[in-house]
Amino acid sequence: MVHFAKWKIILVLAICILGLGFSAPNFISAQQAEALPGWLPGKQVSLGLDLRGGSHLLLEVDSAVVIRDALESMVDSMRGELRKARIRYTGLGIAGTATTVTIKDAEKAEAARQLLRALSTDMELDYDGGKITMTMTERAIRDRKTSAVQQSIEIVRRRVDETGTREPTIQRQGDDRILVQLPGVDDPERIKRLLGKTAKMSFHLVDQRNSVEAALAGRIPPGSRLLPSDEDSANGQPQMYLIKKRVMVSGDTLVDSQPSFDSRSNEPVVTFRFDSAGAKRFGSATSKNVGRLFAIILDGKVISAPVIREPILGGSGQISGSFTVQTAQDLALLLRAGALPAPLTILEERSVGPGLGADSIAAGKIASIIGIIAVIIFMAAAYGLFGVMADVALAMNMFLILAALSFLQATLTLPGIAGIVLTVGMAVDANVLVFERIREEVRAGRTPISAVDAGYSRAFTTIIDANLTTLIAALLLYVFGSGPVRGFAVTLSIGIVTSMFTAIMLTRLLVVTWLRRKRPEKLPL
């Protein structure tokens, strides 16, 4: 254990140099770090919400909308199948978590029942006196709600990532809630606007055969619906459109959306592009309806209703309106990230100011400094020169932890600082085991080199066992924990790995180098 191959010496020195290099940007300002050349390490430790400040949001997924959409889709399917089979019916609609329809022809009731039963395995069919009721099963309701929450988490993550927010925390809480923590967010209102929009986009034909005035008076023709525009008319009220219910092209087939500027008016617009299936449907819809108004609907509002001048066969187009540069960017972001399966409601909102983070950092610094100084004094007093060598390794251990956090861009939270302080004591634990073992070997009459060799050899297994069990506990905290618990687990795990390196490799290298140069007759322990 007192022999060091040259490649080992080079490896230890290289790791120490890299540790110093990757930790160095944390000792300069963020502006100076960004100005460093690209070939130099420039990443700083990413601070969590409790240290950096930011926004904390608790969102609730309106799962009832998902169930309602599924039932409306079932109603459309029932209507289509009954019409194809030429079965007369009445009273087709939704009642709670079920769809109902009454068959007029008693002799065709059995045929209708068999036809509707085949539509879905998630619905239980009940027939009573010509009335057919199809009720969604509890399992189907539960599966749809779970899927809606999981899909919402993914969409929220995409939207937040598109804004450039670093190290956000987005996780499920309870059955239908999502916790969102955004460190360093300086415009929380924009984030709330982005998360509050469902962003369901679809393309419909405008009903030009019937008048909007008649629809406003309550005479809405079958197959059409009345929708407002996102722009106000001259009287300050939203302009109304009579829109065909049939979806010509769905926004689900969008593959890209970008903010841009119109080449003629130089106004902000949003360009979009469909996948192959969407491009085919879009081209077919525009080819068959040249000269008609084609409405673009987003979250129940008409954002644009241009005239189809010619077939659009390329699978791409643009949305124009009263956009600013910011709103065009936000709409493009929403369309790229995808539509939420259900609306999100903000149940709780908290803004954490950077002052609290500064106080926490200051307290953490004081605790760390006091802990380091106390350990340094104890090691030097208890083990003399060997204790000083352990103190050098302890300092390098702190640089390595800082370098690992910077390189991995792991979020440092207040519990994470607690993990670092705990690591300070653990970092010299392996050295204490080795030094005490060396003392025992010296008392047994061994020579200095033989005592050092035996001390490291016999303490090695104990060091590995002790640190490995702690590392397993830290990994379990990370796997099963969340938020601050994970932050503690990350810094503790990094600290265990770096402390094992500095104790087993760096301190031993210092001790062996001193032994070979001085060849002492007595160890200063």
Image (cartoon, rainbow, N blue to C red):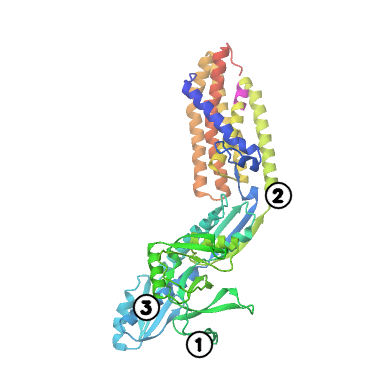
Q: Residue at x 54, y 39 (%)?
A: 407
> Disc 3 residue type?
Met
Distance Cα–Cα, label 2 vs label 1: 59 Å
Extent of the magenta region: 386-391
**Could you tell me which residue is drawn at 55 percent across and 79 percent down?**
240
* Residue 355: image tag: 2
Q: Tell which of 57 and 216 is nearer to you.
A: 216
Label at residue 78? 3
Pointer 2 or 1: first along the chain: 1
The amino acid type, in three-letter code, at marker 1 is Arg
From this viewpoint, which residue is outermost toward the front? 264
Provide residue 520's location: percent of width, then percent of height. Answer: 58, 12
- Give the residue at mark 1: 219
Residue 170, position in %: x, y?
Answer: 54, 55
What's the residue at 41%, 78% (across, down)? 99
Q: Residue 126: which disc? A: none
Q: CA distance from mark 1 to mark 3?
A: 25 Å
Can residue 504 be seen here? The reply is no
